[in-house]
Image (spheres, rainbow, N blue to C red):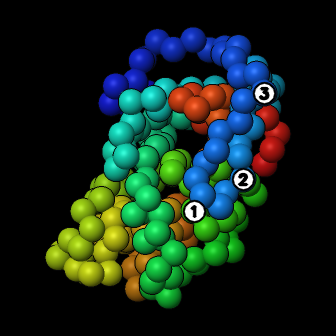
Amino acid sequence: MSAEGADLKKRRFLIAATSVVGAVGAGFAAVPFIASWQPSERAKALGAPEEADISKLEPGALMRVKWRGKVCWIVHRTEENLADLKTNTDILVDPNSEVDHQPAYCKNAFRSIKPEYLIAVGICTHLGCSPTYRPDVGAADLGGDVWKGGFFCPCHGSKFDLAGRVFKGVPAPTNLVIPPHMYLSDTQVVIGEDGGAA
Ligand code: FES
């Protein structure tokens, strides 16, 4: 795992969280924390889950976590980002995530458990290149006003928004994949395990 400000030697088990719940933004349901966690046998067979500390991930920033040999991104979206994700959805191929590229608990407007955090596999759904994080709203080389931040794949020009939703008219056919994940606390998330919630 590589991550800005993340502790690389985090303990595997976390015993935490009583009955606290996190308020996750206006209009969204609170997210219960998992009181304790161990990888399920199924998850271990598929590859060890990875735990990440997101306590130092500033709004607008991205960190990377390696899970099953793939780079996954965690992006801390701003309030502006969340508002932008509700606009211009007509430029997207699959704005409502009809294609099964996310766990059921992420089939929502933000493709996430907590709206402020996007967690996605950082692999282009065209031919597998690694898209570049481009949070710069209005970037002239990415369409100007229609670009509200997202990911650009340099291989063949595919574009994805900050929910990993693919733009129309690019080679990538589908949205980026959202991996199974769950929150252990406000600042700890594990990728590759969801306690069977999927
Ligand atoms: S691999 Fe990303 S656009 Fe082709």
- Residue 121's x, y, as percent? 51, 49
Q: Say which mark, if any, is on residue 163.
A: none
Can the viewer see residue 120? no
134 and 127: which is toward the camera: 134
Residue occupying image coordinates x 41% and y 85%: 169
- Residue 133's x, y, as percent? 31, 55
Give the image quarter of residue 128: bottom left
Vertical comparison of 53 with 22: above or below: above
Residue occupying image coordinates x 65% and y 61%: 27
Left-right relation of 132 to 190: left
Vertical comparison of 30 with 69: above or below: below
Left-right relation of 183 to 134: right
- Residue 162's x, y, as percent? 43, 62
* Earlier residue among tags 2 and 3: 3
Mark 1 lies on a secondary structure that is loop
Mark 3 lies on a secondary structure that is loop
Residue occupying image coordinates x 34% and y 71%: 148
149 and 187: which is toward the camera: 187
Whether residues under marks 2 and 1 lie with C-beta atoms below 8 angstroms apart, the answer is no
Q: Amino acid at mark 1?
A: Phe
Which residue is denoted by mark 2 in the rendering? 29
Which residue is denoted by mark 3 in the rendering? 19
Q: Amino acid at mark 3?
A: Ser
The crowding category of the residue bearing disc 3, from other C-alpha atoms within 10 Å (few below 14, some 14 to 19, many at least 20), is few
Which residue is denoted by mark 1 in the rendering? 110
Q: Amino acid at mark 2?
A: Ala
Quarter of the image that includes the N terminus: top left
How far apart marks 2 and 3 lie (CA) works out to: 15 Å
The crowding category of the residue bearing disc 2, from other C-alpha atoms within 10 Å (few below 14, some 14 to 19, many at least 20), is few
Residue occupying image coordinates x 64% and y 71%: 97
Mark 2 lies on a secondary structure that is loop
How far apart marks 1 and 3 lie (CA) works out to: 25 Å
